[in-house]
Amino acid sequence: MAVRAQAAKTAVGLEADEREPTAPGPRRQGRVPLRLRVGVTGHRSIDENDPTIIDAVRGALSQINERRRSGTAATPVDLIVVSALAEGADRLVARQAMLDGAGLEVVLPLPRDDYLGDFTSAESRAEFCTLLGQAAAVTELAAGGSRDEAYERAGRVVVDRSDVLLALWDGRAAQGRGGTAEIVAYARQQHVPVLRIAAGRPGQGPPRPSAIDELGLPDVLGPLSDDAFAGLDRFNSSPLRGGGKQPDLLPPEYLTAAPPHVQRFVKYSQPYFQRAEQIAQSSQRLFLRFTWLLYSMAAAAVVVVATQITFFRNDPTIVWAEVIALAVVVITLALGRRAGWHDRWLAARYLAERIRCSIFLAATGAGDGLRPVAADKQPSDVPDPDPNREWAERAFREIWRRASRSFVAESDVSALRTLLIGAWVDDQIRYHQKANRHLGKRQRLLTWVAAGLFAVSAVVALIHSTHTFDWHSEPDVWAYLSIVIPALGAALSGYGAQREYARLAERSRLMVCRLKEAKKLVADSKRLSSLQRAARSTELLMRSETADWYDVVRLHDFEVPS
């Protein structure tokens, strides 16, 4: 029965994704639309046909719409209701929101066939199936514990996925585990704004109070802060190069041998990955080229001054070359900061790596990859101070929650184990081994060249100060060299420090050791449950490494060369 329910869930998600009229075009381009999610909690015993409650619900939805952030052509902000579709409040809100064009995402506390037994009539079960068929995404929570515990889990998942919670609640304490009062309390703990509609239950007396309460509802309801929304909109608006070889989420040899549910997930995720990968590569390329230009022009300015003083003392026009070099430094700094190539590179790379890892979680059914890792954690009442990682993380959540995922059979374990080792762990081992060699070589080269220049400079300074080889001629070449050579050495040292070659090379070396341990864990997994644990462990390792890399590199944006 559980298998059939899981299969039904997958079919619903897939059909809804293909049915959505605005989805195919943007998805082919890899643009990530935002969805303002309105979670629903409330009493199952309320009268769904009470005109007073219906009017209050429509008024609350209208209020949310009025405060909803305005989207753009590249980044629309759609309204989505997140509901368990229980009788009463859940369905009432879902119906009213969908009348105004809102979408629906469903969180089922139990497998579907089991959940149907909680409904009071055949008409109620039919309505549930109809609404479920209209959902854009369905999450079916695994059975476990009592029904009250299942409802509590579902209520918390609804809150966790919501940007605002609409509560149809009489204001009284919950009568059982997972009741409306507990879910509202949980939302407050998670700092999710709550919009309350006073709705009574039969035999409980009038609700208190009798109007809509705003519990922390902000003036503007948006899934992202202003800076983070601007970052995502710029990501969605960026033109992509046409033609040529596009980056593959999975190597073709692994994709063709993968189980069908993996191929479907890759097909869905590929456009998002390609956009993130292309933007990361192009932004990194521009950032590195302009960083090199910055340090080169700073050194050139010193060289020009020394050249003018030493060789062209009576020709002031050479000073214009220094002015041009310094102007290029200033313009490069201003242009690089304004264009945001550094931020775009890091955020797009972060998103691309999140998408890449999600394949293997989806392949094994190992979870959603949305749990925070140590490097990601922020105090619950403090917003993420970095808007770039904020929008990248939200974009990944949007992509993941719209994806269709299938039941994973025990018979797929062998193929999945091969996939995880070859296309994921071994691929990352090779990448970090290559990165360690490449970055280490770069660091050694810069170190030796800079050290050589400073050694030559020391010799030149000694010769100049002791008047050795002093031919009493003009111009003073030794003085010139004692100025120019340290300037070149300082430029190389500054560039090497800015790139963090040594630190990143060491990180890759350590990551290879950890990945080899993860590979052994995957290889030793003979059953699906152990393979899922290995996949979760490996994903957390890679995500933690990506977050740490991000924190190291984000501190080195365009800087004044010194």
Image (cartoon, rainbow, N blue to C red):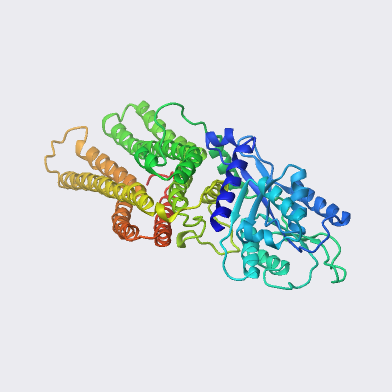
In the image, residue 73 sits, relative to residue 529, either above or below, namely: above
Question: Looking at the rendering, which quadrant does residue 99 occupy?
Answer: top right
The quarter in which the N terminus is drawn is bottom right
In the image, residue 201 sits, relative to residue 286, either above or below, namely: below
In the image, residue 430 sits, relative to residue 119, either above or below, namely: above
In the image, residue 125 sits, relative to residue 273, either above or below, namely: below
Instruction: Tell which of 185 and 494 is nearer to you.
Output: 185
Q: Residue furthest left?
A: 469
In the picture provided, is 26 more to the left or to the right than 527? right
Residue 531 point in image, percent of width and height = 39, 59
> Going 61% across and 65% down the picture, which residue do you hit?
153
Q: Is residue 192 visible?
A: no
Instruction: Tell which of 275 and 518 is nearer to you.
Output: 518
In the picture provided, is 233 more to the left or to the right than 240? right
Residue 375 point in image, percent of width and height = 45, 60
Q: Is residue 209 visible?
A: yes
Residue 60 point in image, percent of width and height = 79, 53
> Going 80% across and 54% down the picture, which residue do you hit?
57
In the picture provided, is 6 more to the left or to the right than 99? left
> Going 19% across and 47% down the picture, which residue do you hit?
455
All told, the count of numbered labels is 0
Instruction: Tell which of 115 and 278 is nearer to you.
Output: 115
Residue 39 point in image, percent of width and height = 69, 56
